[in-house]
Image (cartoon, rainbow, N blue to C red):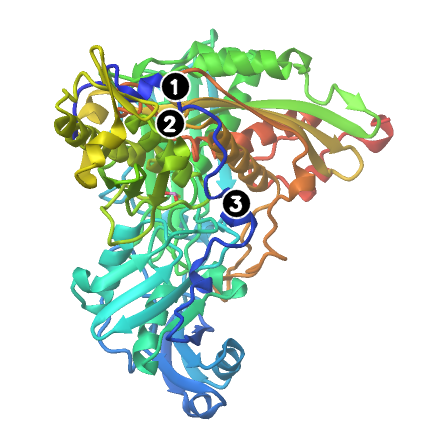
Amino acid sequence: MKFDTPATTNPIDRLRVVGHPVDRVDGPLKTTGRAPYAYEQQLPDRPPAYGAVLGAAIAKGRIVSMDTTAARQAPGVLAVVTAENAGKLTLGKMNTARLLGGPEIQHYHQAVAVVVAETFEQARAATRLIRVRYERERGAFDLEAARPQAKVPEKENGGEPVGDFDGAYASAPVQLDATYKTPDQSHAMMEPHASLAAWDGDALTIWTSNQMIAWGRADVARTLGLDEEKVRLISPYIGGGFGGKLFVRADALLAALGARAAGRPVKVALARPLIINNTTHRPATIQRIRIGAGTDGRITAIGHESWSGDLPGGQPETAVQQTRLLYAGANRKTTLYLAELDLPEGNAMRAPGEAPGLMALEIAMDELAEKLKMDPIALRALNDTQVDPADPKRPFSSRRFIECLRTGAERFGWDQRAAQPGARREGRWLIGLGVAAAFRNNLVTKSAARVRLDREGRLTVDTDMTDIGTGSYTIIAQTAAEMLGLPIDRVTVRLGDSSFPVSAGSGGQWGGNSATAGVYAACMKLREAVAARLGLDAAQAEFDEGQVRQGGRSVPLADALTQGELSAEDAIEFGDLDKRFQQSTFGAHFVEVAVDAYTGETRVRRMLAVCAAGRILNPKTARSQVIGAMTMGVGAALMEELAVDKRAGFFVNHDLAGYEVPVHADIPHQEVIFLEETDPVSSPMKAKGVGELGICGVSAAVANAIYNATGVRVRDYPVTLDKLLAQLPAPERAA
Ligand code: MOS
C-alpha cells in the first residue's frame, strides 16, 4: 500500500481498541519470567557451549603477538577464535569499527578473542590465560583538544545557511553567545548484549537482542560472507536498547564464529564491564549557540554549531537538528563539525541529535529570555513558526507547540515560579522551576506484515518488528483487532524473526507508527479477501464484533473461513508527504527542583511533560515511554557522564556502579499529558513517534530549574553539585 496522500476516514478511526490504555499483552510473560531473552533460549537437543570475550587492553595500536596455548589447554575449553583464525570478515555496513579486532586495534575493549568452553566460568577463566603483547600508538581522546582540527563532514553537515546570519547577529540589539557541553553517555540498558548462535551446515541462526532485524541480518551475512538467505535472526524479547542494539555487535558475531569453531551452538553475553567500551555510546558534544533578537524578543538570527568526535569513518552527533526547525528567524546557520577520536564508536542513543541538541538550545533560550526580561514561555511562543523556517513552502503537518507550553504552564502551576532566581526557599532548600521545549522529528519508513485468519477465527500477525520494551506487541495487536473487528484476545502477534516480513524495526521513534501502518496495510488486504469470500464489497464493509456488515447484511466473519484460512501480506510504503510537509513531534517539559543551599545536592521534586505527537495508539504504553524518557533526561541532567581517560583512551566508569543512572527514589512525581491530535499526513494510523520525544528537552528543563532555584548557570552537563557549590548563595543567608 502506497501512502502518498493524507489519510481520510478509515477503520482505525472507530477507536474501539486503538487509542485505549490496553495492558501490555506481553506483560504476564515479562513479569513471570517466561519471556525468553536471547541468553535464555534453549535448544533441547543441542546443549550450547559458552563464549567469553576478551577486550583489547589498548585504545589504539597493534597486537604484536598473541599466545592462546594456555587458554586452549584450560579445563573445558573447546575453541579460541581470534582475527588470526576467524577467516575473512568484512566490516558491517552499520559498524564503524570491526567487531573482532586484530592485529590493528581501533579502540579500547575492541574484542580480540572469544574463548568457547563447556561452561561460562571456564570460558571466562581461560580468557585470562591469553597472553597478548601490544604495540601502543598515540591516539586522540580529547574532544576539546581535537576541536581545532574538526572538519565539516560532507554528509550530515548540518544544513544550508538561510539569509545572512553573521550580519543579522552582529546588528541584533540583544545577543546571546554561549557554549555548552554534553558528555559521552551510555545506553545502560538492563539486558546486556547477548546472543545464541547455532549452525545447520552453512545456515546460521542467531537468537539475539537486536532492535533492527533486517539490518542485523544483512550485516551478519555481509560480515561472514554468507547469503542473506542463510542467516536467520530471532529477537522476540529485548530488555532495552535505546539505540545500542540498532546494529549487530560483537556478541552476535563472536557467538557465530565460536559456534562454527566449536561445532556446537554457542552463547555469548557481553559482560557489563565490557559493554561500555566495547559497544557504542552517545558522543560528547561542544555546542556554541548564538541568538540575535530584537528588544521585543523576536529572533532575527539563530546560529548553532556543534563539535563531536568519532573514530575515522564515523559520524557526527547531529545536535543542531532541532535548531533548523524549532524557532522562527530569517537568518540561520547550523553547522556540524566532526573530529577524529580514537575512543570507542559513537553512535545513536535515544533521540540522537535532538537530545543533546536541546540540552544546549533550551538553556540558551532560558538565558535569552532572562536578557530580554521575558517569561521563557512567552519568548518561545513569540518565536513559534508553523512552517519550515528554511523553506516556508513546507508547513508542519501538525505543530501544537504553544498549546503544549500553555497547557503545561497551567497544569504545573508555572505562576509559582519566581522571575528572580534564588528567591524561593523552603528551609535549607532553594526551590526552582524550569521549562524547555520538546522537539523530535517524526520519521516514517517502509514496513511490512503478514496476517492470517485461521479456521477458528484467530488472527495471527507476523512481522520482524521488535518490542524493545516499548509495547510493540500491544499496539500491533490493537491495530489488527481494530481492523478485523475482533477482540484483542483473538489476536496473536509474533515479532522479531527475520523469517517474517521486513518491518520498520525499532529506532528513531519511527517504529510504532510505521509498523502499525504496515499491519494496517496487510489487514486491508485481508479484509478484501474476507469480503470476496462473503460476496461483499470490502470498501463498504464494516468489520465489527466478529461480524462483517454491509448495507442491511451482517455476516459472521467465521463464515469466510469455513473454506479454509485466509492470509494476506502487504507493506506500507511512504511517498513524498514527508518532503511536502515537515513532520515533527512537539512537547513541553516542566520541572521543579530543590537544591540544598549547603551541599548543592539537587532533588527533582515534580516533572510534567505535555506532548503533541499525533494519535496516541495506547495512552498507557505511550505514557510509559515518556516517563522512561523523562527519567533518562534527569540522568543526563544530573549524573550521567562517561569519564574519559584522556591519556589511555577509554571510559573509566565502565559499569553501573561508576556510571550512575536515576533510580526510583530520584524521581518522585511525574505526569504526562497528551494533547488530542491526529496527523493524517504521518500514516493511516495518524500517529507519530513519542518514545524519543519524551527525553528531548528534559535535561535543559532541569538545568533551567536549577538556575531558577540558585542563580547558578551551569553550561556543562551533568549539573553535579561540585559545579554549583562555589557559587551558591552564602550559607548563612540560606536560612
Ligand atoms: Mo534509537 S537511538 O534510533 O534506538
Foreground: 80 or 109? 80
- Per the image, the residue denoted by label 2 is 323
10 Å neighbourhood of mark 1: few (<14), some, or many (≥20)? many
Reading the image, the residue beneath label 1 is: 327
Disc 2 to disc 3, C-alpha distance: 42 Å
Confirm whether residue 470 shows in the render. Answer: yes
Amino acid tagged 1: Tyr
Q: Nearer the viewer, residue 137 or 553?
A: 553
Of callouts 2 and 3, which one flags the residue occurring earlier in the amino acid sequence? 3
**Quarter-of-image position of residue 43:** bottom left
Q: How many marks?
A: 3
> Are the residues tagged 2 and 3 within 8 Å (C-beta)?
no
What secondary structure is found at the residue carrying circle 1? Answer: loop
Residue at x 34%, y 47% (from the top left corner): 495
Residue 605 vs residue 165, the one in the foreground: 605
- Decide which of tag 1 and tag 3 comes sooner along the chain: 3
Q: Would residue 723 be seen by someone viewing this image from the given angle? A: no
To which residue does mark 3 refer?
28
Q: Is residue 642 above or below residue 710?
A: below
Q: SS class of the residue under badge 3?
A: helix
